[in-house]
Image (cartoon, grey):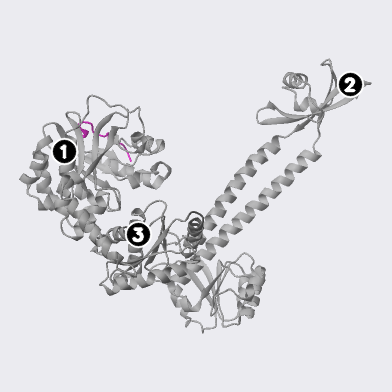
Amino acid sequence: MRSIHTLLVDDAVAGESELQRRLTSKRDAAFLIEHLQTLSAAVSRLQGGEIDVVLLALQLSEASIVAAVGRLRDAAPNVPVVVVTDTNGNGAHENAPGARAEEYVSKRSASRTVLRRALKEAFERHRVRVAADAESRAQRREDEQFRGLVVDGAAGLIVYSRDGEVLFSNRSALRLAERAQRRLHAAVLGRPFPHGATFELEVGRERVVEVRISVCEWDGKPCWAASLFDISAHKRAQVASECAGERLRDDNARLRRLASTDPLTELSNRRGLELELAREVGSMRRTGASLAAVLLDCDDFKLVNAALGHAGGDAVLKELGARLSGSLRPSDHLGRIGGDEFLVLLPDTRMAEALYVAERLRLAVSDPPMRTATGALSVSASFGVEMVSHECASIDAVVVRTEAALQRSKRRGKNCSSTQDDGALGAAEGAAALLQALQDRRAYRVQRQRIVRLDDASIVGWTLVPCGPAGTFESRRDFLALARERGIHTSIDLGCLRACVDDARGLQQFSSAHVQVLPSTLLETPCSELLEVFAPALTDVVFCVEISEQQWIGEATRLRDPVRALKGAGIRVAVRDVGFGGSSLETLILLEPDVVLFDAQLVQGSAKDPGRARSLRRMANAVAALGSSILAEGVDAREDLELMLALGVAYGQGSLWESDASAQTANETVPLTRVRAPTRGS
């Protein structure tokens, strides 16, 4: 990507501009800075062209800023202007929209990150707007050309008697309907038309004639006159206009996203959350529903930036945003409102429920540790939880109310959730009661997900997924994170496994059953004890233990002995979450899994993403070379299914079959390792 050519207009002496130093980076060349000290010099330079964006940082009054921006816009109307000012950018220039800058940045907050983001967003918004204007002008030109063709073009004319005789036709009519005269006559004479009736007639390939019927007299006798107009160009223009309108709608939607989205995490920014808050408060006033807010702030994030640099810190923030988003409902609203601060709006949620959600988010932040270039990194956050009043008018008001609760969490030692009262203690007690209940295998519910052969949709096995009691920590991931924090995750994981084995005894004989086990459980549990858990159903069911590649930190060599013990007992081994972000070919070679699971986040939508499709193809070739079978998770669309088949993936699971009542329940189920995915060229 080429550098953004930036004209910096700053009072500072050449080479001593603080703004120039902030924008210049040895790590990348995103900006090419050209520094001038006076407005007159800047105007002259703009007339020479080749400038992408202007950063105006002169010491001027607000009225003078308006005049300066006007001179810059007059010199180069297509170059956006960003102003660094002591004010907030909402003064007299509001009354001079023609001279308004693209964006105003407060000098107090003009950090390197803010400046670079402001310049990039101003350049991108202006570029999209210029493209949309050009598209609109092109559309208007096409419409004018079309009107000229219709108004000034030679029309055909055919006169019919009431008996069906052609009384007159001109040359244009013969030319327009030369190959469709019979169909035209039949259409005109087929039924009585009122005066002024119109219809369209295809008279050739991509050629359409509009026929207008008039009641008139010919030689004193009543007759019909059919006027023929070639509207082929209009039809083509109509299609082009619809395409142009769709492109304009896409551009406008993109502009709206840019205005309400945080560019780093791709979550909502303050403006986006303001829009969501207004909608939710309006709903509260209409229905009387409740709305809770959760404010979270990373603990000691300055240490993360110091250890990894700002680029590494940005990567951690992106991962943090993804983890938080994955722990919320589709109806919840998550946004980044500051450097390492996030705000969550929870519609139709009471305080007790919000505290449980905050606890789930807290665990999602810290568990498992994040993978970075320098190794595993433990991150924690403090949370403040409060209810939102139906009189609340802004995000700032929500932040002020939750900030007090968040500071209480900081004072309590960080990495915890608080309200302005002691409500958080109830959530902690509820979490402890949940873990106590999960010590009993009867507390679990086991859900079954089909595993199908992709080429014929026959069922070849089941994935057994344990769930806890209904509530905030219902999913295995959530209650295991809670258990890991209290050091009892191994016993809870074994309880999950026992519940799945009990459920597997109800499957058809020789069915294949996939169960998930934590790597730490395999390392901490003696092999003899682990095999005793499988013993009640081992003779009737073909078990496959799924180990998540994302859940072990460090070398996989320690897992080699437990994996060999499982295989020696006839239990198959699968590595899951491959392709999620840290896949290691060395891991696959070391563990020699019978099955490799492609992660749903990589599979979903891969048919429409050439980059992900290429990644999947390379991984499929590597796995096939190892002799392992492939199971694709999250196959929810037909086009993704077709891609998996083209890559030689033999098995899959997803909503495409979960809701398909016609899927086979074959009497014979086939263990996944009996069919090997064919090797395909890259």
Residue 162 image offset from top left, x and y in percent: 84, 17
Residue sticking out furthest to the right: 220
The kind of secondary structure element at disc 1 is helix
Residue 153 image offset from top left, x and y in percent: 79, 37
Residue 197 image offset from top left, x and y in percent: 78, 29
- Identify which amino acid the numbered label 3 is placed on: Ala
Q: Is residue 642 left or right of residue 91?
A: left
- Labels 3, 1: front one: 3
Instruction: Say which of 644 and 85 sits in front.
Output: 85
- Identify which amino acid the numbered label 1 is placed on: Asp
Q: Is residue 672 magenta?
A: yes
The residue that label 1 is drawn on is 502
Classify residue 125 by image quadrant: bottom right
Residue sticking out furthest to the top: 163
Could you tell me if the residues under marks 3 and 1 are in contact, i.e. CB atoms within 8 Å?
Answer: no
- Identify which amino acid the numbered label 2 is placed on: Pro
Instruction: Say which of 9 and 200 sits in front.
Output: 200
The residue that label 3 is drawn on is 354
Q: Earlier in the sequence, mark 3 or mark 1?
A: 3
- Labels 1, 2: front one: 1
Span highlighted in magenta in the image: 671-682
Q: Earlier in the sequence, mark 1 or mark 2?
A: 2
Give me the C-alpha separation between circle 3 and circle 2. 81 Å
Classify residue 568 by image quadrant: top left
Residue sticking out furthest to the front: 288
- Quarter of the image for the C terminus: give it: top left
Packing grade of label 3 (10 A; few <14, some 14-19, many >=20) is many
The residue that label 2 is drawn on is 222
Q: Earlier in the sequence, mark 3 or mark 2?
A: 2
Classify residue 539 by image quadrant: top left
Observer able to see residue 679: no
